[in-house]
Image (spheres, helix red, strand yellow):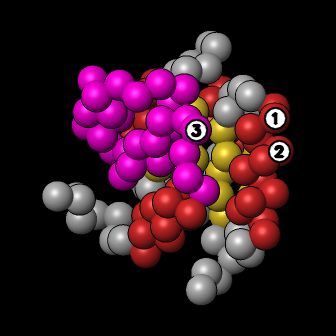
Amino acid sequence: MNCNPIIHLIDDDHALLEALNFLLQSEGYTVRIYSSARLFLDRIEPTESGCVLTDIHMPEMTGLDLLATLNERGVVMPAIVMSGRSDVGLEIEAKKRGAVDFFAKPFDPEILLAAICKALTRPNDVPEI
């Protein structure tokens, strides 16, 4: 279904990065892996396309801080946030900062893939309700 969109995968958990990379590539996505939000920001271009899939709890810069920085830089890409724990407050804050979805780990891979597909096909300027 996809036309080889890029998934920007950001997490400090190496094992999770490998597992998600395998899953996403097996679905035909191009995956770029970053072990930190800072590394991602150092390499991203303002006109970059695709979808951001980021952990929320990382050293140096959290996923929430990453979303705020992307907004400040005018980078328009859908973002999905992952967390090691379910937390309604974090989910609300992530969505306020522009996340299109939020997942507590572990999550069902099929549900994540459906969320990525939805994020990639929704208009960037129309807020989800």
Image coords of residue 56 (percent x, y): 51, 28
Image coords of residue 49 (percent x, y): 57, 63
Highlighted magenta segment, given as a residue range = 80-109
Dot 1 crowding, Cα within 10 Å, few <14, some 14–19, many 20+: few
Quadrant where the image shows the C terminus: bottom left
Q: Nearer the viewer, mark 2 or mark 3?
A: 3
In the image, residue 115 above or below residue 53: below
In the image, residue 94 above or below residue 99: above
Left or right relative to 104: residue 4: right
Q: Which residue is mark 2?
A: 18
- Pick the front one: 27 or 123: 27
The quarter of the picture where residue 91 lies is top left
* Residue 15 numbered tag: 1
- Pick the front one: 66 or 18: 18
Contact, CB < 8 Å: mark 2 with mark 3? no
CA gap, disc 1 and disc 2: 5 Å
Contact, CB < 8 Å: mark 1 with mark 2? yes
CA gap, disc 2 and disc 3: 15 Å
Q: Residue at x 49, y 60 (%)?
A: 111
CA gap, disc 3 and disc 1: 13 Å
Left or right relative to 109: residue 42: right
Q: Which residue is mark 3?
A: 106
Specify which label sits upstream in the sequence, 3 or 1: 1
* Residue 27 numbered tag: none
In the image, residue 51 above or below residue 93: below
Amino acid type, residue under disc 3 in the picture: Pro
- Pick the front one: 1 or 124: 1
Identify the secondary structure beneath mark 1: helix
Residue 73 belongs to the span the image colors magenta: no
Q: Residue at x 81, y 57 (%)?
A: 22
Amino acid type, residue under disc 2 in the picture: Glu
